[in-house]
Image (cartoon, rainbow, N blue to C red):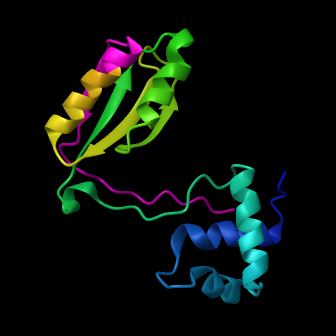
Amino acid sequence: MTVIDEKNKKILNNIQIDFPIHSRPYKIIAQRLGLSEDELIIRIKQMKEDMLIRRIGGNFSPDKLGYHSTLCAAKVPEDKINLFTKTINAYSGVTHNYKRDHEFNIWFTFIASSVEIIKTNLKQIIKVTGVETILNLPATRVFKISANFKL
């Protein structure tokens, strides 16, 4: 298990807000932090394996790229949660999902090139999982905030 020592804190703080667009971004980050590129890569790999880092990638605004996004909420019986989440995660347009302590207990975002594709995929999910209550809450206005976690 990865220890979140001072070096890892600096790495996590740095990659959240200022990831370089470059052919060797880890070299640039390593130089900023006074580390070798190899040490940085080893530390990031270990933090990914330990699930301290879930994903490293860009965030894009779907509407500016001609896509549609929606937030979905589903009433999933406890015994179907694994099937349901495995099913929705198989769709490339599902960016993430999470469980809530609520009547609508599984929430997920869905992005696609058309509203019709989202609707069709939601119907397929209902058919495969037997979960019939899925709310489709399309974005009508976008508010983007930055979620950075200072360590």
Foreground pick, 29 / 45: 45
Rendered residue at 34%/23% (across/down)? 125
Tell whether 74 sits left or right of 119. right
Task: Residue 88 in the image: state x and y as whole percent.
Answer: 42, 31
Task: Residue 48 in the image: state x and y as whole percent.
Answer: 68, 56
Residue 63 occupies which quadrant of the picture?
A: bottom left
Res 99 seen here = yes
- 62 in relation to 119, above or below: below
Tell whether 92 sits left or right of 56. left
Q: How many marks?
A: 0
Res 135 seen here = no
Foreground pick, 124 / 19: 124
Asked whether residue 18 is drawn in magenta, I would say: no
The quadrant the C terminus occupies is bottom right
Asked whether residue 143 is drawn in magenta, I would say: yes
- 30 in relation to 103, above or below: below
- Magenta-highlighted residues: 126-151
Rendered residue at 29%/53% (across/down)? 143
Magenta stretch: dominant secondary structure: loop
Rendered residue at 65%/86% (across/down)? 27
- 124 in relation to 1, above or below: above
Task: Residue 44 in the image: state x and y as whole percent.
Answer: 71, 66
